[in-house]
Image: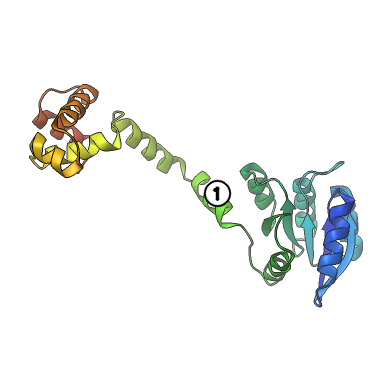
Amino acid sequence: MIKVLIVDDQELIRESLSIVLGGEADFDIVGVAEHGQMAIELTKKLSPDLILMDIHMPLMDGVEATRQIKSQFPSVKVIILTTFQELEYVREALATGAEGYLLKAIHPRDLAAGIRLVHHGGTLITQEIAKQLIADWITPSERLKTEKSKKASYGLTEREIEVLKELSKGASNREIARKLFLTEGTVKNYISNIYSKLEVTGRHKAVFKAKEEGIIH
């Protein structure tokens, strides 16, 4: 049996989860709590295997409660269950040791499956949030490279860079227009913009500077 403690400040949510999860043959709902302080007290008293933890609660929120519970009872698993799909809360909750994060709107069957997964050592994070976390956890050096790359582009648009690439191949305005499905007049305008942004005159200088700055290869 997986001993589960449900922590949420809304009575309706606590009762609903108790009924839904209590119907699972391998779950034992050992208790419910309406705020973080009560969650800590019941964890000491009931020794649950896993806690479903709300984020926003009176007296003590879910993040702080998770932090204290994980420091005192590291073997207890915690799944943050909330309606707020916001990165800052996910980051804080995971930083305190929570093993998972789910929205309250999840289907009961999926919630039960998630509890079993975490109980057996898994980590539960939605794909969308994982992508956000990965993007947010880019190292400072990588972020600096990205910023330099953006600056190095000199504000050129994707289309202007495409035109630049064709220029580097020695293509004429007519050839560029045909390949990119543009008019020759439009190509001339793009080339004029490229010269202005790169602060150069002439195709060869534009191509040389673009390669030197890493805008094209």
- In this rendering, does residue 214 appear at all? no
Residue 3 is left or right of residue 161, and the answer is right
Q: Nearer the viewer, residue 141 or 110?
A: 110
**Seen in the image, is 152 located left or right of residue 80?**
left
Please tell me which residue is depicted at 89% across the width and 52% down the height of the picture: 11
Query: Quadrant of residue 187 in the image?
Result: top left
Does residue 118 appear left or right of residue 19 in this picture? left
Q: Report which quarter residue 159 is drawn in.
A: top left
Q: In the rendered image, which quarter contains the N terminus?
A: bottom right
Q: Where is residue 54 shown, x and y percent of the image? A: 78, 51
Question: Residue at coordinates 17% horizontally, 33% vertically from top-left?
Answer: 183
Label 1 sits on a secondary structure element that is helix
In percent of the image, x 79 and y 67: which residue is there?
Answer: 49
Q: How is the image coloured?
A: rainbow
Q: Is residue 180 left or right of residue 55?
A: left
Given the image, on which type of amino acid does mark 1 rest? Leu
> Could you tell me if residue 88 is visible in this image?
yes
Residue indicated by mark 1 = 133
Residue 188 x, y percent position in the rendering: 15, 28
Q: Position of residue 91 (x, y in %)?
A: 63, 47
Residue 191 position within the rendered picture, expressed as x and y whole percent measured from the top left: 17, 28
Foreground pick, 32 / 163: 163
Callout count: 1
- Is disc 1 surrounded by few (<14), some (14 to 19) or many (20+) residues within 10 Å? some
Look at the image and tell me in which quarter the C terminus lies. top left
